Image (tube, helix red, strand yellow):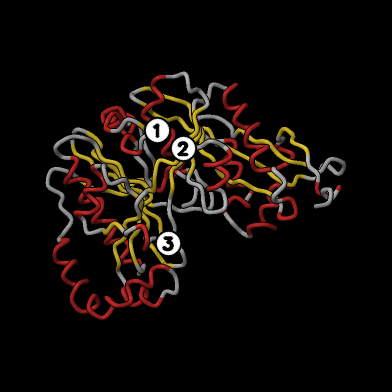
Amino acid sequence: MGAPDEKKKWVPDNYSKADLPALLELTRQNYGAVDWADPGYCEWQYEKSPAGEAVVRVAREPHSRRVVGQYLVMPIWMQVDGRKTLATLSLNTLTDAEYRGRGIFTGLAELVYQDCASRAITFTYGFPNQNSYHGLMNKLRFQDLGNVPLLVYPLKWGALAKHSGKFGWLSPLAGLAGGVIAPARRVLRGKVAGDGFRIREIREFDTRFDAFWERARNRYATLVTRDSAYLNWRFIRIPIRKYTVLAAENDSGILGYLVWRRTELHGVDTGLIVDFFVDGSEAGDPAGMALAKRAIEWSESAGTAMVGTLSLTHTREFALLKRAGLWALPPKLAPRAIALGVRAHREDLANLKPIFEMRNWYVTMGDFDAV
């Protein structure tokens, strides 16, 4: 094997906001018109998180100083074992096609994680795709906690059966479902209950959601801090995407909320339950059921082919979604595995133990940036 092409050498460097236009152009060249090729979206994501600005390193050509790669993690306030903890979410990994295989991914990542440790960031989590899984788990010492189940509620069976991807497994059921299963499930789903609580669409998470968070935050050992600052940033202030937020409440306050979005999931027109969280009171279950049923009805009214979401099997919300009629796809039938990986930067902290077991986590689609 000959020496590497001199033109393909690179050097690591600190990120500057002046680099953003070049990174946006590099993103468009390598990934097309994705959300993170939009300047407003990147400003929101990199600079306006309630937990602080993104930690970024870039790779440059030595002489031209052209940016040829980036590694980035976004700060997120988490709760771990009852304590507010600063963590980061790994996202938007980018290497120019001409420079792949030259160590940019792992080289920049190690520098970023050194920066995280120096800033008292305790751990990083991520949901790697098939391209980054090997690098995160085998080279960057992430621990694979397992896969997050995908739940679906088919609405247009014929459209799903015709889809050429993994959802083609529905084909044998299409005729039966159209005539028998779908109407029966609508009857079994029943009407949205509302005794003792109200459901309404909201356009802002107000201070009542802070009180709700304080009541509900200890239901799981490891989860994103879902206070009003985070929820408004993540679902209300976000450019490009449009989310619809439903809240269930009674005279005592908020009982739960659900975030819905219509988009394509692996080419299928889908009503996504992006985030879903209820409190631990006696009224939490019926309120959560009502929210889930409303999301199904909205998806059906919008003409989508199915409802989809992610939820962990040990959670109360998973049980509510199942009761509302969603199915957990067997791993072999899911379009792709959604793995959760974690790397600690402060291994000396005893209270980090809950982050290394999936049964301690609460995870939804809203906990990463893809939807």
Q: Where is residue 205 in the image (x, y as percent from the top left)?
A: 37, 38
Task: Specify the quadrant of the image occupied by residue 104.
Answer: top right
What mark, if any, has residue 143 been given in the picture? 2
Q: Position of residue 263 (x, y in %)?
A: 44, 61
Question: Could you tell me if the residues under marks 2 and 1 are in contact, i.e. CB atoms within 8 Å?
Answer: yes
Q: Name the residue under label 1.
A: 356
Q: Which of marks 3 and 2 is nearer the N terminus?
A: 2
Q: Can residue 241 be seen in this view?
A: yes
Q: State the residue in front, 300 or 134.
A: 134
Name the residue rendered at 48%, 23% in the picture. 347
Question: Relative to 312, does residue 227 appear above or below in the rendering?
Answer: above
Give the CA distance from mark 3 to mark 2: 23 Å
Task: Specify the quadrant of the image occupied by residue 270.
Answer: bottom left
Q: On the rendered structure, is 317 left or right of 229?
A: left
Q: On the rendered structure, is 67 left or right of 367?
A: right
Under circle 2, the secondary element is strand
Residue type beneath disc 3: Pro
Give the CA distance from mark 2 to mark 1: 7 Å
Q: Name the residue under label 3.
A: 335
Under circle 1, the secondary element is helix
